[in-house]
Amino acid sequence: SASFFGMFEIMLPSGLANKVDRQADKGGYLGAFFMALAMAILSFSCTGPIVASLLIKASQGEVLEPIVGMAGFSIVFALPFTLFAIFPSWLQGLPKSGSWLNAVKVFFAFIMLAFSLYFLGKIDQSYHLSLISREVFISIWIVIFTLLGFYLLGKIRFAHDSDLPHTGVPRFIFAVASFSFALYLFTGFLGNDLKGLSGILPPATVTAAAPATAASSNPAGLCNAPKYADFLALPHGLQGYFDYQEALACSRETGKPVLVDFVGHSCSNCKKMYAEVWSDPRVLQLLHEQFIIVALYTDDKTKLPENEWLTMEDGKVKNTMGRKNQEIQRTRFNSNALPLYALVDGNGKDL
């Protein structure tokens, strides 16, 4: 089951868990296997987001992190059974459940609530719903971690909580950490760019610019007003394109090389690169003066006009910006990892 503030229990069908649990009574190796399987079934509602993230990274071409993550995931489930099988006397020393265990559940419920907003933010950015801005995200996180601090101090109680006659040292330390984190988030409204959270927070750039019109002047350094600039923008005030062919055409006209930036709204490492590498004054100067930049979003759900669709050999049609850019990355650059950077000339030849 997954607990939300100790008030709601989200359960898998009881029959599934009971059937597996009955198999565990058989004993021996088979019994141990089904006992572990029952634990995995009952716990998967909480671990699903972690496993899903690892599988997404694997589908994007990453190797080391998914292997290490899945190995750690499996070891965590296997290790307790292995240790208790080797040292059965340890079972007698396990702490009994009680109010402390409910406090742990509520603590992680707050954490899950915070990260649910993080995953919703990825969807919001991919579909350009403009529901969760950076300011809204930070505000909600400030409220969540402030409430968590009050809960740890015993100022907030839920239905299954017991009386808290005094605050223990561990709870006090976690409460201080929670309040401190909320205060750190608040500095984001005072000009702090919160680089430490660059991979989590929505981008600071404004992506709801006014649509470019035919009469509008071209952005500095570009050959024409780029398509999709009404809802996409590069970081740090940089000007660039969001269509591969547009960037190549401008490169042929100006003689500047193209910096191809394969990026994703849901790519935390891409945001971290923008915040910590692209922000370097030396890098920014080079990007401003010497390159035509094209940011190709591989997870954008914007539907393309029919004349820009890609039809594959197997008959599948790539009709969204993300799917089209994915195909460009896969067929032209033999990769699907994010971020990916490449330098090409106006004819698309690697430099």
Image: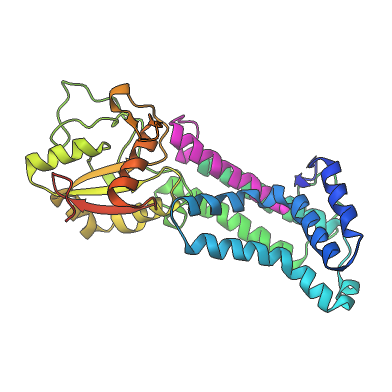
- Residue 138 location, x and y as percent? 51, 44
Number of numbered callouts drawn: 0
- Residue 254 location, x and y as percent? 8, 42
Q: Residue at x 78, y 42 (%)?
A: 12
- Of 72 and 217, nearer the camera is 72
Q: Which corner quadrant holds the C terminus? A: bottom left
- Of 130 and 59, nearer the camera is 59
Query: In this image, 77 relative to 102: left or right?
Result: left
Farthest residue to the front: give it. Answer: 314
In this view of the protein, can residue 236 be seen by the observer? yes
In the depicted structure, whether residue 254 falls above or below residue 130: below
Within the magenta stretch, is there residue 135? yes
In the depicted structure, whether residue 156 falls above or below residue 65: above
Q: Residue at x 37, y 42 (%)?
A: 326
Magenta stretch in the rendered image: 107-136
Residue 246: quarter of image: top left
- Of 305 and 29, nearer the camera is 29
Q: Residue at x 41, y 32 (%)?
A: 316
Within the magenta stretch, is there residue 325? no
In the depicted structure, whether residue 180 falls above or below residue 297: below
Q: Residue at x 34, y 31 (%)?
A: 311
- Residue 45 location, x and y as percent? 71, 47
Query: In this image, 262 relative to 63: left or right?
Result: left
- Residue 69 location, x and y as percent? 57, 62
Magenta span: chief secondary structure: helix
In this view of the protein, can residue 297 be seen by the observer? no
Residue 251: quarter of image: top left
In the depicted structure, whether residue 173 falls above or below residue 107: below
Q: How is the image coloured?
A: rainbow
